């Protein structure tokens, strides 16, 4: 009986370690929520759904695979941030600076993206179903489209 339990624990341990290695830093999450600033933070895969991140400074942050559904990111600075595969369903992205951000695979379903800067951002395989996108250079097709920069 003890041998079976020991074997089960030995088999499961790598799974727990793998998840903790690939997950974001809980201290970075606490810093973001308490100060609104988290430059270069590791928030990979974190659950930030419905978070109020108005004016948050997330420059160079790793938000890949993060759940930001319903989050309010109005006025946030996501310059050079990694949002690859992040869920921004129904998020509010007004006046957000996403200059040079990695937006590959981001889900913007029903998101509100207004007056935001995406100059130099990587935007492959976006999901923009039913999104409201105004005065922001996100659209369908058109390699010839000019993307303005705020600077």
Image (cartoon, helix red, strand yellow):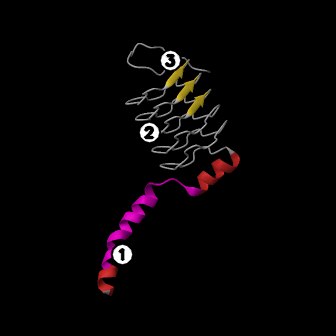
Q: Quadrant of the N terminus?
A: bottom left
| Residue 146 x %, y % | 48, 14
Q: Residue drawn 48% across and 28% down? A: 121
Closer to the N terminus: mark 2 or mark 1? 1
Q: Which residues are magenta?
A: 7-26
**Residue 116 versus residue 58 in the image, above or below:** above
**Front tag of 2 and 1:** 1
Magenta region, mostly helix, strand or loop? helix
Q: Quadrant of the C terminus?
A: top right
**Residue 11 versus residue 37 in the image, above or below:** below
Q: What separation in Å lies between label 1 and label 3 (alpha carbons)?
A: 53 Å
Which quarter of the figure has residue 139?
Answer: top left
Q: Secondary structure at mark 3?
A: loop
Identify which residue, 63 or 68, lies in the foreground: 68
Q: Residue drawn 37% across and 18% down? A: 141
Mark 2 nearby-residue class (10 Å; few <14, some 14–19, many ≥20) = many
| Residue 98 x %, y % | 55, 30
Q: Which residue is mark 1?
A: 9
Q: What separation in Å lies between label 3 and label 2 (alpha carbons)?
A: 20 Å
Q: Residue drawn 40% across and 19% down? A: 140
Numbered mark located on residue 147 in the image: 3
Which quarter of the figure has residue 126?
Answer: top left
| Residue 137 x %, y % | 50, 19
Q: Residue drawn 50% across and 37% down? A: 88
Which quarter of the figure has residue 79?
Answer: top right
Q: Secondary structure at mark 2?
A: loop
Q: Does the magenta segment cover residue 81?
A: no
Closer to the N terminus: mark 1 or mark 3? 1
Numbered mark located on residue 84 in the image: 2
Q: Is residue 53 left or right of residue 145?
A: right
């Amino acid at each position: 009986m003890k041998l079976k339990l020991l074997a089960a624990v030995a088999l499961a341990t790598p799974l727990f370690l793998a998840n903790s290695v690939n997950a974001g830093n809980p201290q970075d999450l606490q810093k973001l929520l308490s100060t609104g600033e988290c430059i270069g933070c590791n928030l990979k895969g974190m659950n930030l759904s419905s978070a109020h991140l108005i004016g948050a400074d997330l420059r160079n942050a790793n938000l890949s695979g993060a759940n930001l559904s319903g989050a309010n990111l109005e006025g946030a600075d996501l310059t050079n941030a990694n949002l690859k595969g992040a869920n921004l369903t129904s998020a509010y992205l007004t006046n957000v600076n996403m200059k040079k951000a990695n937006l590959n695979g981001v889900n913007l379903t029903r998101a509100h993206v207004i007056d935001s800067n995406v100059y130099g951002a990587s935007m492959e395989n976006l999901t923009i179903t039913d999104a409201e996108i105004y005065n922001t250079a996100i659209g369908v097709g058109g390699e010839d489209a000019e993307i303005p920069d705020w600077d």
